[in-house]
Image: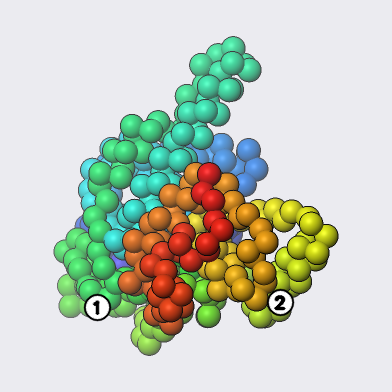
Amino acid sequence: MNLEFFGAAGEVTGSCHVLRVAGKTVLLDCGLIQGSRADEERNAQPFPFDASKVDAVVLSHAHLDHCGRLPLLVKRGFRGPVYAQAASCDLVAILLADAARLEERDARYQSRKTGRRVKPLYSIDEANDAVRQLQARPYRKPFEVVPGVEVRFRDAGHILGSCSVEVRVTDGDISRRLVFSGDLGQYDTPILKDPECIDHADVVLMESTYGGRRHRDRSETIREIGEIIARAGSGKGNILIPAFAIGRSQEILYQLGKHYEEWGLHRFEIFLDSPMAIEVTRVYDNWLHIMDHDDVRQLSDAHRSSLEGFLPSLNCC
Ligand SMILES: [Zn+2]
């Protein structure tokens, strides 16, 4: 077994690790490098391996810094399967299409500005080509990726469909268990299940983005949101909440629904002003059965069957 790191090592984004076992090559994630323009220009550089020689890709989750270079991999000759947790596949399709749209728009703008033809990193058609190679797999059921590499997805509690990837590698009569943590969520994140505990590994590939930081207690944040809403309500003010389209927007919708009476939210019109967040919220609604049962029960106790419906005064626009 041989492991090489080509991203999210010494930096946060661009997660991409190459696992070689018995003549086969498997990629763990194929993420976009995000950050400054100089950082992002590195996305266009050739991969430090031959894309056409990669046998399969395993994705930990749908954030672009974990899947955003898949269309490039396909464009450069990769023809194998891309395994991802089933709910994650729905999100990957949305994210890659959105990334391609932004790339095309940026390329048009740069072309106009510079007077020479600037090509996008990849087009919408190329993003769709990558999406067609997705193979959905459920949590906890082991499956073979290539001979000698068996994978089991475990819930990482980070966003819908996020996984820690348990890899059983067999090379001749040697067997090892590699655990690729993916991005790990916090315990008690609303709607999502807690990260699963994995009890055995020979090698651990661990994300550590917030490893040096102690997160604030969630209940303090919830109390502060309540205070802000109360202040805005009494002063007839408006509240703008900037939020990531995946995960954070749904968490906020859930909290607003849960505290609807307590925070007097009937006084407010609430707008979810992001086509992508709206689309992602609907994907979340389709997958409520794999989320935290107690939190989802709050929806049914309120006679609602979706996050969108949990908040009576929500306008999606
Ligand atoms: Zn992530």
* In this rendering, position of residue 157 left or right of residue 267: left
Badge 2 crowding class, 10 Å Cα cut-off, few under 14, some 14 to 19, many 20 or more, is few
**Image quarter of residue 226:** bottom right
Q: CA distance from mark 2 to mark 1?
A: 50 Å
Tell me what residue is drawn at x 23 percent, y 51 percent: 81
Dot 1 amino acid type: Ser
- Where does the image place residue 31, in percent across and percent down from the top left? 45, 51
Q: Which residue is mark 2?
A: 223
Name the one closer to the observer, 199 or 216.
Answer: 216
Q: Earlier in the sequence, mark 2 or mark 1?
A: 1
Figure check: 290 above or below 129: below
Tell me what residue is drawn at x 53 percent, y 80 percent: 188
Asked which secondary structure carries label 2, the reply is helix
Question: Residue 175 bears which disc, if any?
Answer: 1
- Where does the image place residue 201, in percent across and percent down from the top left? 37, 81
- Where does the image place residue 115, in percent across and percent down from the top left? 59, 12
Figure check: 63 above or below 100: below
Name the one closer to the observer, 226 or 161.
Answer: 226
Dividing the image into 4 quarters, which one contains the N terminus? bottom left
